[in-house]
Amino acid sequence: MLAPFAVRSFRFQWPADLSTSWGIEMENLVLGWYVLVETGSVVLLTVFWALQYLGTLLAPLFGMAGDRLGHRRVLCAMRASYAVLAAVLATLSCTGALTPLYAMLVTTASGLIRTSDQGMRNALVADTMPGDRLMATMGLSRTTSDSARIAGSLAGAGLFAAFGMGPVYAVITAFYATGFLLTLGVARSRPHPPEARRPSLWRDLRDGLAYVWDTPASLAAMLLAFLVNLTAFPLTGGLLAYVARDVYHIDQTGLGTLVASFALGSLCGSIAVSLAGRVIRPARVMIVFAAAWYGLLLVFAYMPGPASGRLMLMFAGVAQSLSLVPMSVMLLHGAGARYRGRVMGVRMMAIYGVPLGLLAAGGLIEHFGFAATASLYCLGGLFLTLLIALRWRTALWPLDSPANAR
């Protein structure tokens, strides 16, 4: 599991990703709770979370920029911008000028950039690691965001309750700045051969989309990624603040424990992938655990209290990692160096399902309640997952298919 640390570049990238993830998770929890308390509206809460995903439409452009300029260079520029925007919110908060409107405006600016961070991380890992270590490295890399959701959410909730917004945002800014500085130590991407370069950005984008469309396993993975972002992630992301306050009647510290429970499960799943990387059949594992994820979220929707809810969230987190990490490895293996950034950019576009799912959930919850809305999302998601598995079964299920290559 620790073999990836033998590569010097990864010894810089892992703590850089960890520091950035701490900042992201603290900021998500603090701002989400702030907007819900200040406005008292679940609809505005879902609008706030949806604004963070506007950048999914720009993700292919970041992927193309990474392929052309180097993934490290683009990721450094992105992380510098996180620190600047967090410093703006820290200043507004310390001067008493922060309002929900300003929070949403800065969130919109951040969302145009930050959504592509995970895809750029993955592409940079694939650039700098040997192919036979990719599954183990991806699992280990994923522990940065999973562990940050545990510690970052708990720390953010505790600092917010004890000191208020200003000091918390000073800490968030420091985490982003540290992530930027450490990213500078990551190895530069290997240059692409001249024939891989394209004179036109539009040609680059068209080639990336055409590759995904013409590769059955990649197309199925993209559709599944969009589906889980539309119907699964809203239940364990933006809507957890509503569950904490209006379903379980707990405060922001209790919200932190719900977020941390899901993240703890995700961390366990990521560690399992890292340990078992050489025996995992990516496409099969992706489908099986996506179905399990929906089943566990359906049970979570009917848990009577926060204790049982935390337990179900932890199990759902395990299933989530066991589905999504193999998905990323399968896409990276298939894309190769030429299409790696563009495929990860298209993969990040699938995250656009999150704002759509959140906005729809806000109205549905107001009319039908959380449990009924969650049931609709889980049952619909499970049905469509099985439909994807059936439609592309010849590309996803045989043990000798490229999508299941170890």
Image (spheres, grey):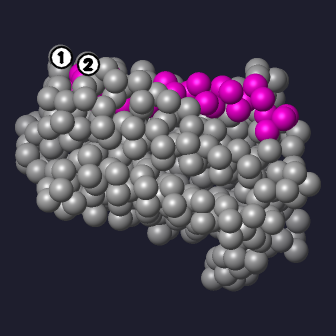
* Within-10-Å neighbours for mark 2: few <14, some 14–19, many 20+: some
Which of the numbered marks, if any, corresponds to residue 162?
A: 1
Q: How many numbered discs, if any?
A: 2
Residue 279, percent from left and from top:
84, 35
From the viewer's perspective, tell me whether residue 184 is left or right of residue 298: right
Q: Is residue 288 visible?
A: yes
- Nearer-the-camera pick, 351 or 250: 250
Q: Is 277 a magenta residue?
A: yes
Name the image quarter holding the C terminus: top right
The residue segment tinted magenta is 252-280
Residue 335, percent from left and from top:
78, 61
Kindly identify the residue that appears in the image at 77 percent across and 71 percent down. 215
Do the residues bearing badges 1 and 2 touch, measured as CB atoms within 8 Å?
Answer: yes
Q: Is 275 a magenta residue?
A: yes
Q: Secondary structure at mark 2?
A: helix
Kindly identify the residue that appears in the image at 75 percent across and 70 percent down. 216
In the picture of the structure, the residue carrying the numbered disc 2 is 158
Q: Predominant secondary structure in magenta?
A: helix
Above or below 204: residue 101: above
- Nearer-the-camera pick, 262 or 141: 262
Q: Is residue 90 visible?
A: no
Residue 11, percent from left and from top:
70, 26
From the viewer's perspective, tell me whether residue 239 is left or right of residue 33: right
Name the image quarter holding the N terminus: top right
* Amino acid residing under circle 1: Ala
* Amino acid residing under circle 2: Gly
Kindly identify the residue that appears in the image at 26 percent across and 18 percent down. 158
- Nearer-the-camera pick, 282 or 171: 282
